[in-house]
Amino acid sequence: MTFTEPWLLWALLASGLPVLLHLVNRWRHRSVPWPSLRFLFQATHDSSGRQRLRDFLQLFLRVLCILFLVLAMSKPVSSPILGLRSSGVQRIILLLDRSASMAHRPDGLHSHRDTVIPILTQALLACPNTQVFVLDSVERDIRPVPTPEEWLKHALPSTTDTQADWPDLMARTAQFIQNSPAGKTEIWIVSDMQEPDWQPHSPRWQQVRSALLAMPVAPSLRVLSLRNRHSVNRAIRIHRAEPRPQALEIEFSIEQSSPASNLSPETCKLEVSINGNTRSISVDFPGVTTRFIRHIPLPPDTHQGYGSIRLPDDSLVRDNVAYFVFAPLPVAHVLIRAEQQELEQTLSNMAAPPGLPRDTFRADCRHVQAGALFLDDVSLVVWQGALPVGQQFSDLMTFLKRGGQALFLPSMEPHEATLSSPPPSLQAYSNQQEHAAEGTWFNLQSWNHQEGPLKDAQNNIPIPVDQIRAIIRVPFLGAGTAYAQWQDDKPALLFRAFGHGGAWYLNTLPVYSWSNLADGHLMIPLLNRLILQGSQRLSVPSSFEAGKPVDALSLLPGTPVIRVDSDTSHSSSPLSSAGVYRQRNRLFCANVPVGESSPVQLSDTTLQQLFRELPMTPLHVESSRETAVFNWQTPFLIFSILCFLAEAFLQLSAYPQAFLQGQQQHRES
């Protein structure tokens, strides 16, 4: 129990006034023997025991009457969320989880958010003289609450499709308290304890603890944990949606989190919507996470659009639908320059192999012309021979710094340095060539299997780089990061970073008089991966997780965003809700983050380790009834009135008996 007006508790001393007056009254009277009254004393001797008991009850009721009245005036309340240490708090900062997992319905009817509403309603109303601020996981802006009634009635934030970032929320709270000290502060945290949201291994927690402990008065924390959830939950994820001739190929997965005893094969009926047209399909789901590939027929001449796949509703409906958009493969432009036309054609064929099915882009090769280089829409520059100078050098450096990729190949003939040579920052080759001894060759022996354009493919399948043999190579000059080495440990593939992009250098040529690079074992995967890497600066994601920053989506400021898969014509906050959106001619979709479907919740032990020395109270909630704030003011007033009436009844009941005893004593005398 706590008190909203604790200073009035000093008035409890007034409950001792009836006892004090009783003692003073007894001291004021002094007994004097009087012979005529001895018969009266004898007559009343039998009733003196009952009289003392009645006097004691009257005194006790007077004390209780004053005691309950003072307690009622102090406005007592009781609730686990408030606790015993809430007295004297000047400010409460409420951190509210609005992530998708807060929509869990453990009983099938009421979500975690529904449970939180009555708790916060009663808790905030019980603190009328305390400053209340709110910080939610979506807006991430600390706002004052003018009155609890207004906030709870009009502005109680709803659940979204986003993921909470608790280290960031705590860091913002610590900074707010540092910038605006206001005495004793309590931090109320309302969360369903989703472990991906809390990120317990993040190094930011150490900074948060240090900042809070460095304050003159460290704030206390109360963590309202909504851990109750259904044992089985299913989620759907779409991995790709690509148009094929007269069909749409969709790869998706159904993920299930449940105990092993609940796993059982069954047939799931899915609702597939494409461009507003809905149809049902069935898949045999074995009860564990499984990937599926299905071909959905498309109307003729349909090459782009949007859609969704929906699972039957379960305890968390927000991850039962996944959205997608589809369009023809984007075109990646490659600029190629070579000293010989035959070599230029070889590089073009390896950058865009004819007849090779593509999954991510279509390559379009261009050739360098005289004058300035136009690289605004180029993903990769392949440059063989003498490096560019003048305006071409400036254009190429700007291209690299903005995130472009370039692959340089040595010249067939050594070039002496001249005044028109490129600056040393781009130069990497020496003016000499190394030839293997007759009957031998240089072998590519080691390369980076984990990072870079030569890393292993899926399922840890390595690229056959070790099949490369070279007769001629050109040594490197200057520093760089080696991603492949010859058998004598000299670098074969070198990388230099320039701004957001980088330059790659090979020291042999795809010409059979130099090496067997023309076979494509290394060149085809190398070129394709560099094209894909360079395209990232030009590509805008068509699918993202709800809650991503606006900068990551390259949205045009001031341009309306229209939701196309619902009746909502405009959305002021498209990043917090899953769905399909359009901005001008760009179509994109948002989906629930993967972490919101995770069954792993943060344990109390880990929670205690995150806050450590800070005073923290974890509070578990299964339903709103268990944490309801009870106001004791009215009961205490009723108790005070009952005590007053009981004391008055005892006082009045004593008058007739005293009158009868007086009459009897008068007749006897």
Image: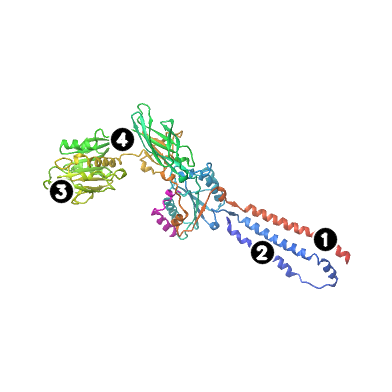
Name the N-terminal-most of marks 4 and 3: 4
Q: Which mark is residue 16?
A: 2
Q: Circle 3 sits on which residue?
A: 430
Asked if residue 558 shows in the view, the reply is no
Q: CA distance from mark 3 to mark 2?
A: 101 Å
Q: Residue at x 35, y 30 (%)?
A: 303
Q: Residues within 10 Å of mark 4 (few under 14, many from 20)?
A: few
Magenta-colored segment: predominant secondary structure? helix
Q: CA distance from mark 1 to mark 2?
A: 31 Å
Q: Position of residue 432 (x, y in %)?
A: 13, 48
| Picture quadrant where residue 413 is located | top left
Q: CA distance from mark 4 to mark 3?
A: 38 Å
Identify which amino acid the numbered label 1 is placed on.
Phe
Image check: 648 left or right of 451?
A: right
Image check: 535 left or right of 367?
A: right
Q: Circle 4 sits on which residue?
A: 330
Image check: 439 left or right of 303?
A: left
Q: CA distance from mark 4 to mark 1?
A: 109 Å
Name the N-terminal-most of marks 3 and 2: 2
Instruction: Identify the element where label 3 is drawn.
Output: loop
What segment is highlighted magenta in the picture? 194-214
Up the image or down, 548 lies above or below 489; here it is above
Q: CA distance from mark 4 to mark 2?
A: 87 Å
Q: Which mark is residue 659?
A: 1
Q: Residues within 10 Å of mark 2 (few under 14, many from 20)?
A: some
Identify which amino acid the numbered label 2 is placed on.
Gly
